[in-house]
Image: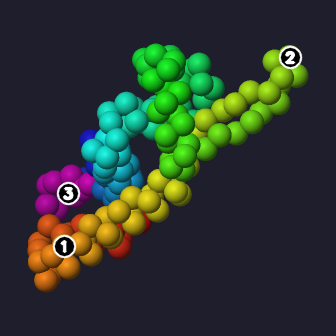
Amino acid sequence: MQFVKKISFDHKLQSPVYSFNFSGLFATFRHHFLLTLLEAQHSKYHARVLRVLHSKGFLEEKDLIQFCLLDIKQSRTIINQLLSEGFIQSQEVVVKQQGKMQLYGVNERVWRDRTAQRVGKACLNVIVREGSLGSKAMMAFEFNHLFF
């Protein structure tokens, strides 16, 4: 119910008047869609790392390991894969007592652009194979056009 808000009461119709937060709803839908695609392409652990980074912001590697409940070797492999594909970015911060600290965060623009490119390629493959877009592919094409 976070996307629906009661704003007033219409006394003539004897019913409440509601407001819908469509931008928040679409942003949540897009984020869930992106995570689902990433999980289908890579693994649930990749999606978990991105979900934690999206909710917490930039994190150190040890904090990311602790939040994601992964072992060190597996988490480094996942972080390096996501870094090489551009889904996450690293930022080096200089701290006086500790020296340099490496922080990791989500690169939203690259993530959305790569997903939009994959959805567009999938629609193009359907057109080439079938000769036209079916209803599901047409919906994916429209979704790609509107939200990415």
Position of 131 relative to 70 (above/below): below
Report whether 132 appears left or right of 73: left
Q: Which residue is mark 1?
A: 126
Badge 2, how many Cα within 10 Å: few under 14, some, many 20+? few
In what quadrant of the picture does the C terminus appear? bottom left
Name which of mark 2 and mark 1 comes first in the sequence.
2
Position of 135 relative to 6 (above/below): below
Of residues 118 and 139, the one nearer the viewer is 118
Q: Which residue is mark 2?
A: 97
Position of 12 relative to 133 (above/below): above
Residue at left offset 77%, top offset 33%: 93
Badge 1, how many Cα within 10 Å: few under 14, some, many 20+? some
Q: Nearer the viewer, mark 1 or mark 3?
A: 1
Q: Which residue is mark 3?
A: 11
Badge 3, how many Cα within 10 Å: few under 14, some, many 20+? few
**Magenta region:** 10-19
* Residue type beneath disc 1: Val
3D distance between C-alphas at marks 1 and 3: 52 Å
* Residue type beneath disc 3: His
